[in-house]
Amino acid sequence: GLCVFLDKTCIHQEDKAIQRKGIDKLGAFICASSQMVVLYTDLYLRKLWRDYEVVCFVALHPPIKMKILPVAVSFVYLFGLGILYVSDGVAMVVWTQASFCQLSVMVKLTCSILVMVLFRMRARMKAGIEKRLSNFSVRESKCFCEGDRSMVYANIAALMQETGAAAPNAV
């Protein structure tokens, strides 16, 4: 069956002993995963733990298995669908047949413009994501608890050594 891992809910956030056990198993879970879905915002690749998850996944799986879904695009899609639904519903109730056709054409034209705006937004977001990835450095990532930084670096080094992407003595 389908198995889903949500990092914020599957890694204990309060009990440090349980949290550490979850963190220790994070690499194994990512290794066993077949896909990774990233709900992307501008902050996504600026947080150390998220960077760690991305590094682990990309080290263990082909990049095509990672799906990046910009969150803002979803809102535009939903907004466009909502406009279509509401305007067609109102038009059916209020307008005569002739007016309905005219209104329907106007709504479709408006939605077409929204779709063009959506594609433009998506292209800009994709370019921004690609720029962020091309300049990516885990050392620039923010960390809520700076004490975690050395643990994350050690886990990344261990993973890279284990996969043969780094020499056994690399740090």
Image (tube, helix red, strand yellow):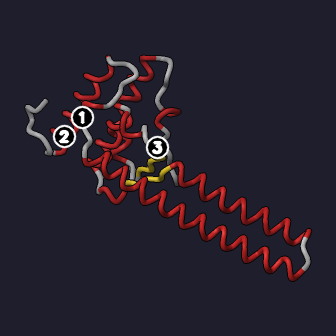
Measured from the top left, where is residue 64 in percent x and y?
Answer: 34, 60
Which tag, 3 or 1, sits closer to the chain's start? 3
Farthest residue to the bottom: give it: 98
Measured from the top left, where is residue 60 in percent x and y?
Answer: 27, 49
Quick one: SS at disc 3? loop
Is residue 117 shown above or below 11?
below
Quadrant of res 126: bottom left
Judge left or right: residue 162 versus residue 110.
left
Q: Mark 2 belongs to which amino acid?
A: Met
Q: Mark 1 belongs to which amino acid?
A: Ile
Label ID, residue 61: none
Is residue 66 shown above or below 162?
below
Quick one: SS at disc 2? helix
Q: Badge 1: few (under 14), some or many (20 or more) residues near its Cα, within 10 Å?
A: many
Quadrant of res 90: bottom right
Residue under circle 2? 160
> Of 29 and 136, which appears nearest the observer?
136
Residue under circle 1? 156
- Residues marked 3 and 1 touching at CB (< 8 Å): no
- Residues marked 1 and 2 touching at CB (< 8 Å): yes
> Of 74 and 156, which appears nearest the observer?
74
Residue at horizontal 33 percent and vertical 37 percent from the top: 51
Label count reads: 3
Residue under circle 3? 41
Whole-angstrom CA distance, mark 3 to mark 1, is 23 Å
Judge left or right: residue 139 versus residue 148.
left
